[in-house]
Image (cartoon, rainbow, N blue to C red):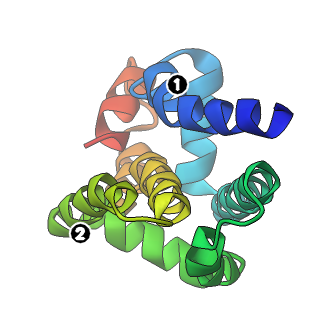
């Protein structure tokens, strides 16, 4: 029962995180966006959080339905997510390529229609979520060139989510 409740919480996270954080210009969020854009270690930490979130989802999904084989299909993705430098490159590639975002989104919608593919779809959905919140190279360049401007934080948040 608890595992099923945690699965619902994971599904809600995919909705609540964008609602709470997308283009949020509160000071705490602006500090987070600046650190992600300017600090390499902060980006590595975000990738590690993504990997832990996906691992925890797989554990909860297996606890909810141990006879389900869908976890086996998305387990190799976990091992890839633990390679943080390559995962950073992957998230940047997803962030910069619109066609890749569309293809992965369609895949997230289509995979749950196939038997045993729900864990793959949710894993890809979390990767997409983190890719959309991952800073582009233009965001760091924007902040470095405009850090003395008035209302730089609001402009930075707009540039961060372009």
Q: Position of residue 125 (x, y in %)?
A: 45, 53
Question: Could you tell me how many numbered marks the image carries?
Answer: 2
Which mark is first along the chain, 1 or 2?
A: 1
> What quarter of the picture does the N terminus occupy?
top right
Q: Which quadrant would residue 43 be assigned to in this image?
A: bottom right
Name the element at disc 1: helix
Are discs 2 and 1 less than 8 Å apart at CB?
A: no
- Image-based side of 129 in relation to 109, left or right: right
Which residue is painted at 39% across and 26% down in the image? Answer: 23
Name the element at disc 2: helix
Which residue is painted at 42% across and 28% down in the image? Answer: 22
Q: Within 10 angstroms of label 2, few (less than 14), some, or many (20 or more) residues?
A: some
Disc number at residue 100? Answer: 2
Which residue is painted at 70% across and 64% down in the image? Answer: 51
Q: Within 10 angstroms of label 1, few (less than 14), some, or many (20 or more) residues?
A: few
Q: Which residue is mark 1?
A: 16
Q: Position of residue 108 (x, y in %)?
A: 34, 57
Q: Position of residue 41 (x, y in %)?
A: 73, 63
Residue nearer the viewer, 82 or 43: 82
Which residue is painted at 66% across and 57% down in the image? Answer: 50
Q: Is residue 39 above or below residue 15?
A: below
Q: Position of residue 21 (x, y in %)?
A: 50, 26
Residue nearer the viewer, 7 or 19: 7
Q: Which quadrant would residue 161 be assigned to in this image?
A: top left
The residue sitting at the left extreme is 99
Residue nearer the viewer, 15 or 96: 15
Q: Which quadrant would residue 154 be assigned to in this image?
A: top left
């Amino acid at each position: 029962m608890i595992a099923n409740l945690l699965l619902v919480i994971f599904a809600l996270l995919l909705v609540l995180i964008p609602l709470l954080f997308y283009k949020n210009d509160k000071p705490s969020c602006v500090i987070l966006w600046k650190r992600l854009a300017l600090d390499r270690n902060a980006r590595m930490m975000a990738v590690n959080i993504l990997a832990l979130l996906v691992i925890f989802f797989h554990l909860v999904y297996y606890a909810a339905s141990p006879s389900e084989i869908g976890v086996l299909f998305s387990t190799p993705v976990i091992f890839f997510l633990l390679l943080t430098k390559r995962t950073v490159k992957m998230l940047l590639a997803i962030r910069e390529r619109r066609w890749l975002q569309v293809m992965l989104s369609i895949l997230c919608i289509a995979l749950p229609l196939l038997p045993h593919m729900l864990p793959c779809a949710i894993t890809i959905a979390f990767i997409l979520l983190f890719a959309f919140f991952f800073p582009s190279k233009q965001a760091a360049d924007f902040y470095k060139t405009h850090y003395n401007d008035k209302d730089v934080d609001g402009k930075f948040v707009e540039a961060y989510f372009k």
